[in-house]
Image: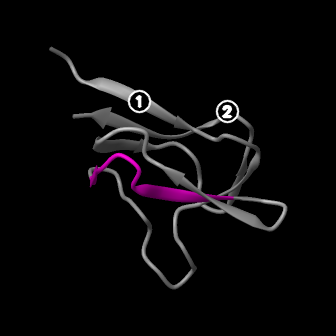
């Protein structure tokens, strides 16, 4: 049985952040194993930060969005290969 790839999409337009703050490491890197509901990144909209959480447990295979760049509603942020 093949692995299922799950796209993590932006629920709203905003600015994508991989880190909780500039001094801290990214939440996740490509190749990291994540658990369902684990924080993957932040999305800032009108000075409000929203934590984007993993919908599944699995491995991060791609980070599609660029750090500190705008994303549109429904843009793919990351792809996770479900366990």
Asked whether 22 falls inside the magenta stretch, the response is: no
Horizontal placement of 28 versus 74: left or right? left
The answer to whether residue 13 is above or below residue 27 is above
Secondary structure beneath dot 2 equals: loop
Q: Tell me where residue 44 sits by quadrant.
A: bottom right
Where residue 78 appears, as percent x and y from the top left, is 48, 42
Give the magenta-colored segment's residue range.
32-43
Residue at left 23%, top 23%?
3
Horizontal placement of 58 versus 74: left or right? left
Where residue 45 appears, as percent x and y from the top left, is 78, 57
Mark seen at residue 74: 2
- Say which residue label 1 marks: 6
The answer to whether residue 26 is above or below residue 59 is below
Residue at left 73%, top 37%?
73
The answer to whether residue 68 is above or below residue 4 is below
**Dot 1, how many residues are within 10 Å of its Cα: few (below 14), some (14-19), or many (20+)?**
some
Residue at left 47%, top 80%?
24
Query: Which of the marked residues, 1 or 2, is nearer the chain's N terminus?
Result: 1
Tell me the quadrant of the picture where the N terminus can be found.
top left
Asked whether 39 falls inside the magenta stretch, the response is: yes
Where residue 80 appears, as percent x and y from the top left, is 36, 38
Secondary structure beneath dot 1 equals: strand
Q: CA distance from mark 1 to mark 2?
A: 13 Å
Name of the residue lying farthest toward the top: 1
Where residue 59 appears, as percent x and y from the top left, is 27, 43
**Dot 2, how many residues are within 10 Å of its Cα: few (below 14), some (14-19), or many (20+)?**
few
Front residue of this view, candidates 69 and 6: 6
């Amino acid at each position: 049985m093949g692995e299922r790839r799950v796209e993590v999409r932006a629920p709203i337009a905003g600015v994508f952040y991989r880190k909780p703050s500039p001094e801290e490491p990214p939440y996740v890197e490509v190749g990291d194993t994540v658990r369902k509901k684990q924080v993957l990144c932040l999305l800032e909209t009108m000075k409000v930060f929203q934590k984007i959480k993993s919908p599944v447990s699995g491995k991060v295979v791609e980070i599609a969005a660029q750090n500190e760049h705008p994303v549109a509603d429904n843009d793919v942020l990351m792809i996770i290969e479900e366990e």
